[in-house]
Image: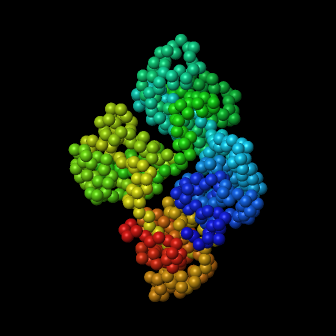
Amino acid sequence: MASKKRGEAQLQMVINNQSLWDEMLLNKGLTVIDVYQAWCGPCKAMQTLFRKLKNELNEDEILHFAVAEADSVVTLQPFRDKCEPVFLFSLDGKIISKVKGANAPLVNEKVIQLINEERKIATGEMVRPQYHEIMFADSDTEDAGEGQDENADEQYTIAIIKPDAVLSGKAQEIIEKITKAGFIVEAKDKRRLTEEDVRDFYSQMADQPDFEDFVSFMTTGISFILVISQGNNQQAHFEEQESELQTQLEEPSEDHPEVEDTDTSAEIKKKQDSLEDYLERQHISQFCDVEDNSINVDKFIDIFFPDFKKMKSMKLEKILALIRPDLFKENKKDVLEIIENEGFKILMQRQIVLSEEEAQMLCKEYENEDFFENLIENMTSGPSLALVLLRDNGLKHWKDLLGPKFVEEASKHDPESLCAQFAKESLPINQLYGSGSLEAAEKEIQHFFPPQSTLALIKPHVSYENKDDILKIIKEAGFEVTHMKETLLTQELADCIYMSIKTKDFYKNVLEMLFEGPSVIMVLTKWNAISEWRRLMGPTDPEEARLLSPDSIRARFGMSVLHNAVHGASNAFMAEESIRKLFGELCPENPEEN
Ligand SMILES: Nc1ncnc2c1ncn2[C@@H]1O[C@H](COP(=O)(O)OP(=O)(O)OP(=O)(O)O)[C@@H](O)[C@H]1O
């Protein structure tokens, strides 16, 4: 599609959406992918190496090269906004290795080694190794150079919250404490443990006299089983914990008799690293048992979460969620808080009174129920809140959180589910809705949040110094930078962008300002993009912006009415006209209504 990439197309396939990414994974043999950012483009320097490898190895069947824009592919989300190029190696449908930075010798060596292996596998000289898929950690602190199998780096702990804590409603509190301390709950399940599970997990206690009683206690009720990782932000909690521990040192109590005066900062640091120690300090270790021996952890992950590795590699999923009218009216804040605490990012939200058709579409599964008519009436009676949620494994997590569809079942078997917690008399079903599948989610999001494109411009006076800051703000606001180029505008282009002020006295000043240097011209896409971008820009006059909208771009980077940092199309007609003029046939038309 983008003509600037036409010259590269022969060497590198262009991946600019998730389905092309998924298709690429089906490539036979090895694919080397240059993951790039829209504003800096693919790594030109490495293309020389790729061309050389392509010619010298002469293995077009099993050696492919690709460029993938981090912003357009959901899987590549962890690489967004990173300045350094990243090269991924895809083999046999898995990303098995990663090289950070334009490290030509390392990439060269890896390609040659992997192609040699492929050749041997093809001739039967060697068996295909079990490749481990690497995880894409969103971390700036990883070493530059070769990325490793990040699975090997992940240290997991299994925690079991016992039935008595679940029964007394303490489980959620414990999980909240753990996450607040900076640990990450990677997977969570509620289940009644079998006798075999308990004997296996607690095998070290098997010779204790009351072990049989313990087994029967553990198997009588529901436990919570968690896979926990350390998380990068634990350091942020370190100071808090350190001061807590220092207080304990200063005021020894019966609860902490073992803490000695000689406890140093290093010792404290060691303590904050262990979940077990943390639970002990919080006096909740009697409710939650921990296993952190890596061999056992691996074994129990396979037993309790057979899909865990698959789940980890599933990456981010976008779903549509809906808070039905009664719940929206009464408990909107509580629900939104839970959504955020559960690690969902709210990408878009919109208050909407559903049409009858829309209500029927979302309630199709109940169409044969007695209460269907009542349900549709209820759903169209007032505003609902539609949300686009993003999270690792989002579809399943949202379903688990909602719990059963019917209130009766939820209250009986899953009282902690949102269905039970937020039940209302008006409906026998869950007050919250979630997409049934990823395919349904895509359609529903498209329906409720149709994407719109607008033209945006970073004016010359800030295009050099503040471009990156402004782009960061744009991305954080959820815009997709669909197209971008840096150019010195001609009068013809300026006339098109500013057609509505061409007759104004100050237009000559506007032209002068535009000719001061290159502008960054972009197509920004998201739901409601035209008005959202104008809101993000702020009022025309930066002085007014600083008063009325201090976080806006013009408030932060504008100097005067003329030098006010950014421009945005005022309406759909202007957006379409100027996009067509500046980017030609590249951009699809906006939907009728947005
Ligand atoms: N009185 C003025 N004197 C000088 N320049 C002005 C004046 N009014 C507007 N401008 C400039 O002309 C641009 C276009 O004016 P318009 O009235 O369309 O404002 P806007 O819609 O807020 O801004 P934009 O169209 O750039 O997004 C403004 O961004 C500003 O730089």
Q: Position of residue 503 (x, y in %)?
A: 46, 88
Picture residue at 29% right of the left edge, 36% below the top: 408
263 and 34: which one is in front?
34
206 and 479: which one is in front?
206
Q: Position of residue 165 (x, y in %)?
A: 45, 28
Q: Is residue 586 above or below residue 440?
A: below
112 and 543: which one is in front?
112
> Is residue 47 visible to us here?
yes
Q: Position of residue 160 (x, y in %)?
A: 51, 29
198 and 121: which one is in front?
121
Residue closest to the far top:
209
Q: Is 8 situated left or right of 116 in this image?
A: left
Picture residue at 69% right of the left edge, 35% below the top: 266
Picture residue at 49% right of the left edge, 48% below the top: 391
Q: Quadrant of the C terminus?
A: bottom left
Q: Position of residue 315 (x, y in %)?
A: 54, 48
How are the residues colored?
A: rainbow
> Is residue 509 visible to us here?
no
Q: Tell me how many marks there are.
A: 0
Q: Quadrant of the N terminus?
A: bottom right
Picture residue at 35% right of the left edge, 47% below the top: 432
